[in-house]
Image: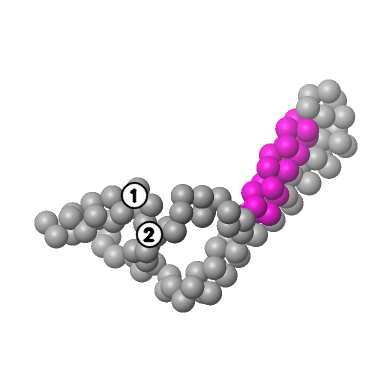
Amino acid sequence: MTEERTAATRLSDQSAGFRRSGEPRKHGGEGVEDGFNVSGMILLGLGVLAVALALVAAGYGFARWAVAGAIVSGVLIVSGIAVLVLEWRRRRTRAGLTPDVRQGH
């Protein structure tokens, strides 16, 4: 019973604008102002755009351009994910937070 209440309390706190540490955000746009995810998101967006361009090139029969677009899109998507993961880890270690320990199953 207490575990269910704890999980429900966590969900309500997160939806009410509280961070995992239990501190409320100072103002509504704080998450938007902090641009630490921007570079990774831009790389992911460019990777998706490169996939679309590679598909168009393949559809029109430009095989070499399609292969080049596929390689570029793969590099962009992987680098975007890597930037996001590394930035997430850097922010967690800088804040002194321990990694989430899986409890239960």
Pointer 1 and pointer 2: residues touching (CB < 8 Å)? yes
Q: How many marks?
A: 2
Where 63 falls versus 77 (above or below)?
above
Mark 1 or mark 2: whose residue is earlier in sequence: 1
What residue is shown with label 1? Answer: 16
Q: Is residue 5 magenta?
A: no
Q: Nearer the viewer, residue 100 or 95?
A: 95
Nearer to me, 80 or 27: 27
Res 68 visible: yes
Pinpoint residue 47: horizontal percent, then vertical percent: 71, 44
The magenta stretch is 37-55
Badge 1 marks a residue whose secondary structure is loop
Give above or below for 54 relative to 32: above
Quarter of the image where the C terminus is located: bottom left
Give coordinates of residue 103: x percent, y percent: 29, 65
Please tell me whether mark 2 sits on a helix, a strand or a loop: loop
Residue situated furthest top in the rendering: 60
Q: Residue at x 21, y 58 (%)?
A: 6
Which amino acid does the dot numbered 2 rest on?
Answer: Pro
Outermost residue, left side: 1
Mark 2, residues whose alpha carbon is within 10 Å: few (<14), some, or many (≥20)? some
Answer few, some or many: residues within 10 Å of disc 1's Cα (few below 14, many 20 plus, some between 14 and 19): few
Identify the residue at image location x=83%, y=23%.
60
**Residue position marked by numbered label 2 in the rendering:** 24
